[in-house]
Amino acid sequence: MMRDQWPALIFLVPFLGTFLLPFLARFKWPSACTAAAFFLWISVLLSAAVLGETALSGPLSYAFSGWPPPMGIEWRADSLSALMALLMTLSAALSLSVSGASSEQEIGSRAAPFFMSVLLAVSGLLGMVLTNDFFNAFVFLEISSIATYALIASGPIRSAPYASFRYLLIGTLGATLYLLGVGYWYAATGTLNMSDFVTRSLSAQDNPILMAGFLLIFLGLAIKMGLTPFHSWMPDAYAHASRTAACVIAPIAAKAPIYLLIRISFWAASPEWLEHWHFWNLLKILGFLGIVTGSLLAFRQENFRRLLAYSSVSQIGLIVLALGIHERNALFGAILHLVFHAFMKTGLFLFAASVESRFGARTVQELSGLVPRMRISFAVMTTSVFSLIGIPPLAGFFSKWYMLSGALLAGDFWAAAAVVGSGLLSALYLFKLLEQIFFRKNPEDPKTKEAPSMLLAGAILTAAVNLAGGFLVPLFHAWAHNGFLKEIFG
Amino acid sequence: MIIVSAVPLLAIAVSAASAVLIFLARRSPSLRESVTFAAAFLKFGLIASLYPAVSAGGTVAFRLAEWIPGAPLSLRVDALGLTFAVLSSGLWIVTSVYSLGYMRALREHAQTRYFASFALSLSAAVGIAFAGDLITFFIFYEMLTLSTWPLVAHKESAEALKAGRKYLVYSLSAGALLLTAIVWTWLSTGSTAFAPGGFIDGRFHGSALALVFFLFIAGCAVKASLFPVHAWLPSAMAAPVPVSALLHAVAVVKAGVFGILRITGYVFGPEVLQSSAIHQPLCALAAFTVIAASLIALVQDNFKRRLAYSTISQLACIVLGTALLTAGGFKGAILHLANHAFLKITLFFTAGIIYVQAHRENVSDFRGLGRKMPLPFILFALAAAGLAGFPPLAGFISKWHLCLGSADSFERLYMGVFLFSSLLNIAYFFPVIQSAFSEPKVGHSVPEIQDNNWLLLAPACLTAALGLAFGCVPLLMKAQSGLADQAVQAVFGG
């Protein structure tokens, strides 16, 4: 049946598209950007179809080359991975379609290699999300990382290669730790298949190697997602990458490692075992650190994109904290935040791209003079900012609501205070940003015009998602409670 | 009797929509101001049209959406909510006239932002009044914070920006506490809908009950500027005078007080609080605020700051009336919510007139002004007397009920607090009048006074007249007290 192959095709279309691009580049039409966006949109359709299928008839499994699991590599799309695939393809396709055209002044003649890297990075992330094999996930982690290094180095600022190199050093360390952990797990259980691992690990739980492997894997993922104290690569990377690269990569890159963290901590290991090793507390502590560090550093930033990057550090901290609560509502809230945060950040990075392309404005100071000429852009940006703070009834409010209710249900008042406090800390640096933009007089620049229409349309779409968050929540709720929440919590 | 109608939603939406129109009409000031007036009259008309149904004992309800499964958002117009909505939307019309005169006389900048934020604030205030459940309440509560921030920071001076930041820090922290309390209530009771007499009966016990009550009250107390979270209000006097008049004497601070009324009457209910005695610390805190704020007001030389401390003290009177948990106190609180509004807005209006026409802000600089511009000071004296509780002004009626309420309560001492606060009222308002009508100091000249600006004077005369009318016109008094009685009956039964 064709539908069994859909999960693989979600990945294969952009992946094979990567290698088609250099040939397509020989023709005048389609441009590399259009072609890359085209492959991603096909992937979006496939992801949507897979999400529908999993909602109707349960998880889809696909064995590569016909080797049945656990021997062969299995791909599995269940309610969570299908959603993640849709989120990533949609976010990337949207960002690429609207920002690709305006990036010519930055990439110039290097269009084909640039868009190849974009496709490769996104397909790597898709592989991480869809595979049901620990080692396979490592391969895709590396694929997406290598492509991301290239994208960051492609930025127009002279220090971009340096930022990329830093990320490469730290990222390689993360991937190595992950691989080492997978090796330990293989030694302890003799399997690489995630589903198979669950059953086999139960009998091996007293084996300390299992925990050592778990910690190594966790460390590797923590580095990759930019969890404090491993976040230092992120601000440089997102501030130096070219505009298009930042729009495509920044909102989703950290989400795939978070997804893998959810997989290993909620599916692959038993909660009591993790409780015994104080893993949930570790998550909460690191998450809390991330919230505080990210917010306080964001408060001090002058560069707009660096501010956004530190804001991501703090939001990732919040998600990890919510995972550490280990409660049904909190997990739901974390997933909601994962999804909504991608749209908030897409909107904000698209905004950054439009002010940079119109005016070259990179610092917050420069923004205020643009307000009278770019009213719609600024309104859209403000929507994303309010959603990030969690102002009701925008999308960010609902994720906060569920994370908070999870913390209260678990009787964990410290975590509840941290969730609420995270909203206040983001308010601190974001209202500072709004104050500088709207209440500081800067000479109005008569040369600026409203943002390029494509970028503006994309930003408006993300704002619409933030505004419509309330309508989406009941859908997500029904889907999650019939899907993965039932699997995990019964 | 429950009537389903979309009128409450329209009443909220009118001013939000007008904010958009105001922005679009930014190139033409007269068109922009006409939008404000059209919206203000339409809003007041829509809200007034609900009066017959509500005064006949009905409740107007409208279900909005169910975004969080199990916690639908709804609007519900009852006697208490209608009182607050009529009050703020009615005074918005008056304040708009005043704003027009004030902003034009001073040639203020960013008038579009000013009028649009004003319209949004009114949407939020009426939304708070009509909210049928805690989440809807919270949505509008946060909206009120956001839409009044540009008004506080309006001048964009270092002082104004600082006041804006202070306001945000206080209000958003309060919002966080309130949100925690709401989520907790939702988890424990499975409901968020306001119910007369409370709905949490039996779901919280002991320290959990006290903690939730504390979170709710702390969340609302910031807007109601109760000690020790009152400090933002005097700073917020950096805002233009019409903002202080409508928002910092009526819409914003009364939203906090209104929240406390809703929480005690419609979430916890008098019986639960009475049996656990957790309302007593609130009573003590409110009583302390009443006295302390009045004493601080005595030494404020800046006129608006003196009014701000007076507001803090009067708001605490309302909170104290609520927290006494007696039918009389609750009624007095609702009446004072309205009557204090008429009188305090008049006081702020006169402050603005003095600022615009004589450029004086400090009480000590008022010497000699009274002879040159008597009308504002006469209005001031009238409203100040009303607040002190002189009959036949409106303040007398509400203070009377507050005293009755304390007589029924567990602690008669609080009657003394109300009476002493009236005395202090006289003590800090009288020097203003004394200063204005005394001879200027030797060597100081009385400033040139601009001609009477009727766009400023007429609203002040009108609100002063309202302050008088609600104390001696039977028709109005009956309508007002009828609504208050209904609310009291719903909460206390019988």
Image (cartoon, coloured by chain):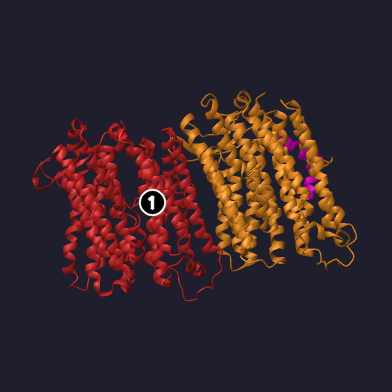
Chain colours: A red, B orange
Is A342 located above or below residue A239 in the figure?
Answer: above
Res A462 visible: no
**Does residue B147 appear left or right of residue A146 in this picture?**
right
Residue that appears at 90% across and 58% down: B438
**Residue B473 lies within the magenta run:** yes
Q: Position of residue A61 (x, y in %)?
A: 17, 42
Pick the residue in front: A348 or A453.
A348
Task: Give the image quarter of residue B266.
Answer: top right
Task: Give the image quarter of residue A59.
Answer: top left
The residue at which mark 1 appears reads as: A341
Badge 1 density bin: few <14, some 14–19, many ≥20, Cα 10 Å:
many
Residue that appears at 65% across and 65% down: B30
Where does the C terminus of chain A fall, quadrant-wise?
top left
**Does residue B386 appear left or right of residue A384 in this picture?**
right
The chief SS type of the magenta part is: helix
For badge 1, the amino acid type reads His
Q: Position of residue B456 (x, y in %)?
A: 76, 59
Pick the residue in front: B223 or A162.
A162
Where does the N terminus of chain A fall, quadrant-wise?
top left
Give the residues drawn in magenta, as a range. B464-483
